[in-house]
Image (cartoon, grey):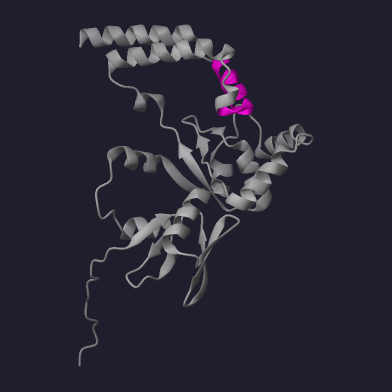
Amino acid sequence: MTTSATRYRKRPVTIDAIQFVDAPSADRIRAAFGDAIRFDIGCLLIDTLEGQMRAELGDWIVRGVRGECYPVKPDIFAETYEPATPQPADRAALRDRIEVWPLARVLTEVQCGSQDWSWEEEWADLDRRHAETGYLTELEQQIRQNGITMPVLIGSDGRLWDGHHRLRIAVRLGIGYVPVELTPPADMVLPEPADRAAVLREAADEIANAFGDPMAKHVGIIAASWLRRRARDIEPGKLRRMADEGQQDGGRS
């Protein structure tokens, strides 16, 4: 009598899945998979035959071949599944730039912003500045209801470019995971030399004109103020010189 196990290969199956990254994705999950899934602060609660399961931010919600729903961790999902149909390149590129990180990883690996402050100093400054406006209290209520609906932006310099207020509320509420968008280095997204020159000239003009542009209505007063502070550190003339050099390189090639 043999004691060795017989080897089997899992049959290929097609499943439906949506990744839980924010409140809008939670709405899509509920619309697609039914009312057995409920949204809670920073998580989804899924009623199954085995009891209630909890899906954390970043998990994939899968509907199996018998209609059952269950969460799958993102690393396991990536090793196990692939799209049944090819995805457009631009959609795949956007997906690759947006990730879900543990909050502890953001606070450990990312610097808090333009100031060389600790996160504790950043939180104290935000609390002080918004003590009378009530903005953080309003934002906390929104996140309690809808979760973090917009990824925080991590720049190519390793600093947090946008999302300080959302992170502050995540710390207050004990949300364990947050969606993040990663900004690639500038030299990874610039086109070939001739086109790069045009891009740099356009960037120089935009920076030079930024101080008089009413950007607050588009990106918010805080983001506009931050952009203007960053713009002060960049010389438009330097960008134009880089553009000219790019034009010359393009002409020699």
Residue 26, x across and y down, in percent: 49, 54
From the viewer's perspective, is residue 4 above or below residue 182? below
Q: Is residue 12 left or right of residue 225?
A: left
Q: How many marks?
A: 0
Q: Is residue 151 left or right of residue 133?
A: left
Residue 115 seen from this side: no
Specify the principal SS of the magenta part. helix
* Image quarter of residue 226: top right
Quadrant of the drawing holding the N terminus: bottom left
Give the camera-side residue of 79 and 165: 165
Residue 14, x across and y down, in percent: 28, 63
Give the camera-side residue of 178 and 79: 178
In magenta, the rendered stretch is 219-233
The question of residue 30 being in magenta is answered with no
* Image quarter of residue 132: top right
Quadrant of the drawing holding the C terminus: top left
Give the camera-side residue of 33 and 14: 33
Residue 38 seen from this side: yes
Residue 76, x across and y down, in percent: 38, 60
* Image quarter of residue 28: bottom left
Identity of the residue drawn at 69% across and 42% down:
138
